[in-house]
Amino acid sequence: MLTEARPRDVQVAEIAPGVLVLRSRTWDRLKFEVEYGRQQGTTSNSYLIQAPQPALLDPPGESFTQIYLQELQQHIDLSQLRYLILSHVNSNRLATVKVLLEKAPQIIIVCSKAGAVTFRSTLGEQLNLWIPRAETSLELGGDRRLEFIAAATPRWPDGLITVDPQNQIVFTDKLFGAHVCGDSLYDEQWKKLDEDRAYYFECLHAAQTRQVESILDRLAELTPPPRLYAPAHGPIVKFSRSRLFQDYRDWCQAQTEQDTKVALFYASAYGNTAILANAIAQALTAAGVQVEAINCETTPPAEMQALIHSSDGFIIGSPTLGGHMPTQVQTALGFILAEGSKTKLAGVFGSYGWSGEAIDDIEQKLLDAGYTLGFETLRVKFTPTASDLEKCQIAANEFAQALKKLRKSRTVRPPSLVEAQVDRTEQAVNRVVGSLCVLTTLPEGCFHLTQAAAILVSSVSQASFNPPGITVSLPQEWAESLCLVGDRFVLNILKEGSPLVRQFQQAQRLGEQQLATLGLKSAESGAPILLDALAYLECTVESRMNCGNHWLIYAVVESGELLQTSGLTAIQHRKTSS
Ligand SMILES: Cc1cc2nc3c(=O)[nH]c(=O)nc-3n(C[C@H](O)[C@H](O)[C@H](O)COP(=O)(O)O)c2cc1C
């Protein structure tokens, strides 16, 4: 961390004949967004190409507008500036562009087609725009020209990379950067940049590796090969070009090798939900989960459908606009509800202004469809604060842990040597798993909740849908006294990791004093509901079957309620060697 903050400034240097870099430098943490988490300051790099028809690339954001333009005018008469190239358009940068256009209205803006839509909607239809098409180049006069590579990603759908073939410079925008501030223009000290570069990749690109890999493929084809990568942030890449390129390849590959994958669907009209999405994606990546970000506004439906099938969980983020979620989020949610497996874990987040209907609506639809939520839904008013981002990280970690447990519980462990010697039939039978529940019932003559019988059961399954019915297997001695035909009981479904699981596993059946320490409320039948359970069902015994040392009880479910919206059902895994 830097000990003293130098004032912001703009550093200027020539990096090739007629190519200047203007580095707007901030020495302290720029914003609280996770990508600045290493607190090394950053630079916002803009480039000026001094040709007969000069071109300027990527002016910085609003906090630099004044000092940047002052410095720029030392190097060019603004009335001579012909082109302004935007590698991507964002609202912060638009503030500087606006001032620049006031001073130099002759400028032609060069950006991608998606960037042009943003420009026109914010600065008006009358703008002078030029959109590069495949195989076209921008002639700057003399022998100077620029070429372009489309670089759309979920995070920057309007991404555009500029190539200066004469100087063998590639202006890579968000690729190959680092949030560090210093006096070095180049990466002579590249070994010291390793951690910052890896963190930058994790925050900016790890959730969009598919798209990054195809951009890398395009860069690999460039002839002559690049001599410099000129990114939007941090040092210009000169000495570690091939090393960093290979790092990017390796980091992309490492993501696809994770054994759990989450599809992160989101849309964001003003950037707030996107900030939350980025924080969630970074924390999931750091927890060893592969994340595939899906910007619902730009991802084709077929791609969304494929991701629904190939992911182990979904997280959906949405703003609320006019009381609703945007149509594109609605489409994505529709695909998930229609095609997603209900055994996959889900999560919901979003930014809102006052009512937040979209977030509630998504959550309710997922719960109604039978999804389990891996974290408590995140609702954030307008722009996220540092504390909101911390909540995103906690939620993402919770989601990653739940996902991994879920995966483990579905993976059959290979038998150990000892296990291989014990009875194979018993081993096979013990592979059947059941959810851990506590059956509570108030025996005749008892009136207080703490006098109830409360027994841990693990052999529970749904037996009928209409009427909704379940079967429970009970040891003979309990079934004979507690669950006769017509008796009513409550089935409390326990949450994974809940202290109740351990408590009941140790005691099997809790006595009056122990029950008195639990949060209880009365069901209609008078039997206690455990308030810390995930959900409960109130049931009436319809029939019973004697099965060896157990009784199988079939009961009709009369009512039920979800007590917690997030968390997984606790499952009993029986030892295979006993
Ligand atoms: C045109 C418009 C309509 C909005 N309608 C609602 C609304 O009905 N309910 C609400 O809670 N917030 C509403 N908001 C506030 C947004 O949800 C809020 O600004 C949010 O941060 C936007 O998220 P985003 O930056 O990810 O797009 C509205 C905002 C705008 C600009």
Image (tube, grey):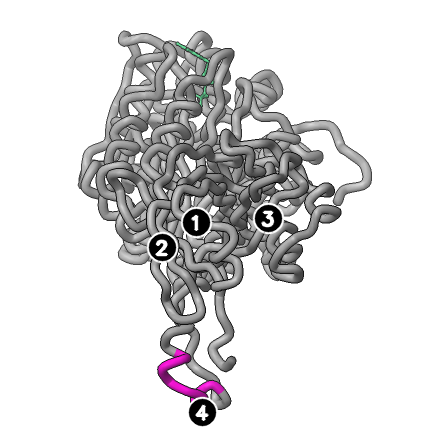
Q: From the viewer's perspective, is residue 429 above or below residue 471?
A: below
Q: Position of residue 220 (x, y in %)?
A: 31, 57
Whole-number angstrom distance, CA of label 1 to CA of label 4: 41 Å
Whole-number angstrom distance, CA of label 3 to CA of label 4: 39 Å
Residue 70, visible in the rendered structure: yes
Earlier in the chain: of badge 3 and badge 4, it is 4
Q: Position of residue 381 (x, y in %)?
A: 55, 19
Q: Residue at x 59, y 52 (%)?
A: 497
| Residue identified by numbered label 4 | 421
Earlier in the chain: of badge 1 and badge 3, it is 3
Q: From the viewer's perspective, is residue 33 above or below residue 411?
A: above
Q: Which residues are magenta?
A: 419-427
Nearer to us of marks 3 and 4 is 3
Q: From the viewer's perspective, is residue 151 above or below residue 405?
A: above
Whole-number angstrom distance, CA of label 3 to CA of label 2: 19 Å
Q: In this rendering, would 146 be left or right of 346?
A: left
Earlier in the chain: of badge 3 and badge 2, it is 3
Whole-number angstrom distance, CA of label 2 to CA of label 4: 36 Å
Pointer 3 local density, CA inside 10 Å: few below 14, some 14–19, many at least 20: many
Whole-number angstrom distance, CA of label 2 to CA of label 1: 8 Å
Residue 17, visible in the rendered structure: no
Q: Dividing the image into four equal quarters, which quarter contains ligand 1? A: top left
408, 15: nearer the viewer: 408
| Residue identified by numbered label 3 | 453
92, 319: nearer the viewer: 319
Pointer 2 local density, CA inside 10 Å: few below 14, some 14–19, many at least 20: some
Q: Quarter of the image for the N terminus: give it.
A: top right
Q: Secondary structure at mark 3?
A: strand
Asked if marks 3 and 2 touch (Cβ < 8 Å), the reply is: no
The amino acid type, in three-letter code, at marker 2 is Arg
